[in-house]
């Protein structure tokens, strides 16, 4: 498969690829160039209800939930098909969301390899899985596998920016899993997505994403009597001790934050360092960030690609402006890159305190905060 010619063929619902009932679609644009990639099916209420009905029927009216042998056999064939398609999936994710192919081991290969093919005593029902645009395949595969191996059925609702990868995942699933077991609906309409989580045929909702969106999903689904699983991530602060190897600690954090332009949960975006070693730590952070390879996400040499969307890029810009307003020092970067697409320079911010919003909130960008701290302590995560 070449992404130059790839385009979604429809919504994978009930074992077939379907056009949306209303004929709606939305454009997917390259985060690297801003150019049109393809049109994505934009599901409406009719489509999500059809997907919920297909998942309900597969769970209640077939042997999927009770026939362990059937599940293990078909999940094994599904896993084999994904392993065969791994190169194409890594290229698709890089093209669509900017995840560099150099990171495919964590974002594509390992999630596929870890798909379970052994039975479990757990039981799952009809599950809506809502996934983010950050590491879309890894998050989707983890939750999909958890549900399917336990006899549950799926309606996957990906983030609009990462819909293509989810639709391709659903297309492959439709060739190896029984009809209705794995369905995918892509939509830009938040109300349509919320309606899906409240559908009477749905037993539980699994959400991975931002805390604000997660709270809305939790309230809506809980009010409809659904079991809700939330993973809303959050920032991570590393505290370096007085005698720590600051170059090693700070450099490791910088590389981790710069990888995939900082678009992942629980990254060590802030390093708390002893006050008297602050300038040493800041210099180490600048040196490490200056060495980060920024470029085409399909180039194996690239570590830091573009942000996944214009909205994501502007979110990072707002955080940089917030840092300035809080008295922070933009020691490196702090600007968009002069190229088409949604790029932001690897950035080092100093001079903030522990109460800064940049330290307490998830920035989701290639920003590393070096925070001076007068206290002493052992090397540990705060």
Image (tube, rainbow, N blue to C red):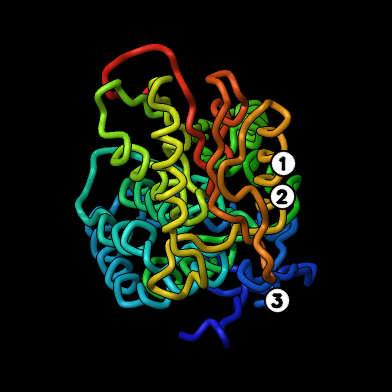
Q: What crowding class fits label 2: few (fewer than 14 Cα within 10 Å), some (14-19), or many (20 or more)?
A: some
Looking at the rendering, which quadrant does residue 33 occupy? Answer: bottom right
Which residue corresponds to mark 2? 314
Secondary structure found at label 1: helix
Which residue corresponds to mark 1? 318
Secondary structure found at label 2: helix
Label tally: 3
Q: Residue drawn 33% across and 68% down? A: 78
x and y percent of residue 190 in the render?
Answer: 73, 47
User: Can residue 255 be seen at all in this image of the molecule?
Assistant: yes
Earlier in the chain: of badge 3 and badge 2, it is 3
The reply to whether discs 1 and 2 touch (Cβ–Cβ < 8 Å) is: yes
Q: Residue drawn 57% across and 87% down? A: 5
x and y percent of residue 230 in the render?
Answer: 50, 33
Looking at the rendering, which quadrant does residue 343 occupy? Answer: bottom right
Which residue corresponds to mark 3? 35
x and y percent of residue 30 in the render?
Answer: 64, 71
State the residue in front, 284 or 101: 284
Calculate the distance from the C-alpha at mark 3 to the C-alpha at mark 2: 18 Å
């Amino acid at each position: 498969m070449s992404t130059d010619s790839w385009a979604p063929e429809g919504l994978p619902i009930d074992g077939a690829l379907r056009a949306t009932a209303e004929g709606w679609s939305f454009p997917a644009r390259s985060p690297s160039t801003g150019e049109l990639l393809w049109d994505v099916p934009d599901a409406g209420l009719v489509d999500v209800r059809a997907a919920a009905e297909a998942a309900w029927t597969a769970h209640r009216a077939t042997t999927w939930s009770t026939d362990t042998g059937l599940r293990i056999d078909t999940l094994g064939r599904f896993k084999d098909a994904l392993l065969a398609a791994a190169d194409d999936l890594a290229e698709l994710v890089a093209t669509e969301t900017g995840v560099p192919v150099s990171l495919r081991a964590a974002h594509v290969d390992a999630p596929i390899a870890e798909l379970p093919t052994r039975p479990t005593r757990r039981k799952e029902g009809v599950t809506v899985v809502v996934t983010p645009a950050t590491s879309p395949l890894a998050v989707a595969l983890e939750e999909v596998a958890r549900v399917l191996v336990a006899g549950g059925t799926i309606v996957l609702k990906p983030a609009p920016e990462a819909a293509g990868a989810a639709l391709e995942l659903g297309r492959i699933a439709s060739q190896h899993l029984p009809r209705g077991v794995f369905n995918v609906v892509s939509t830009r309409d938040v109300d349509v997505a919320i309606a899906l989580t409240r559908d009477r045929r749905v037993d539980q909702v699994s959400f991975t994403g931002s805390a604000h969106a997660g709270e809305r999903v939790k309230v809506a689904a809980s009010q409809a009597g659904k079991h809700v699983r939330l993973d809303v991530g959050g920032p991570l602060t590393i505290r370096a001790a007085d005698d720590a190897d600051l170059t090693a600690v700070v450099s490791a954090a910088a590389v981790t934050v710069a990888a995939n332009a900082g678009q992942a949960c629980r990254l060590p975006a802030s390093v708390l360092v002893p006050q008297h070693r602050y300038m040493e730590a800041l210099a180490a952070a600048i040196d490490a960030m200056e060495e980060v390879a920024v470029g085409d996400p399909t180039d194996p040499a690239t570590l830091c690609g573009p942000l996944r969307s214009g909205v994501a890029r502007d979110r990072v810009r707002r955080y940089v402006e917030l840092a300035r307003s809080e008295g922070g020092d933009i020691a490196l970067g702090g600007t968009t890159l002069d190229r088409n697409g949604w790029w932001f320079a690897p950035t080092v911010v100093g001079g903030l305190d522990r109460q800064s919003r940049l330290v307490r909130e998830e920035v989701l960008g290639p920003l590393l905060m070096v925070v001076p701290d007068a206290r002493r302590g052992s090397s540990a995560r705060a």
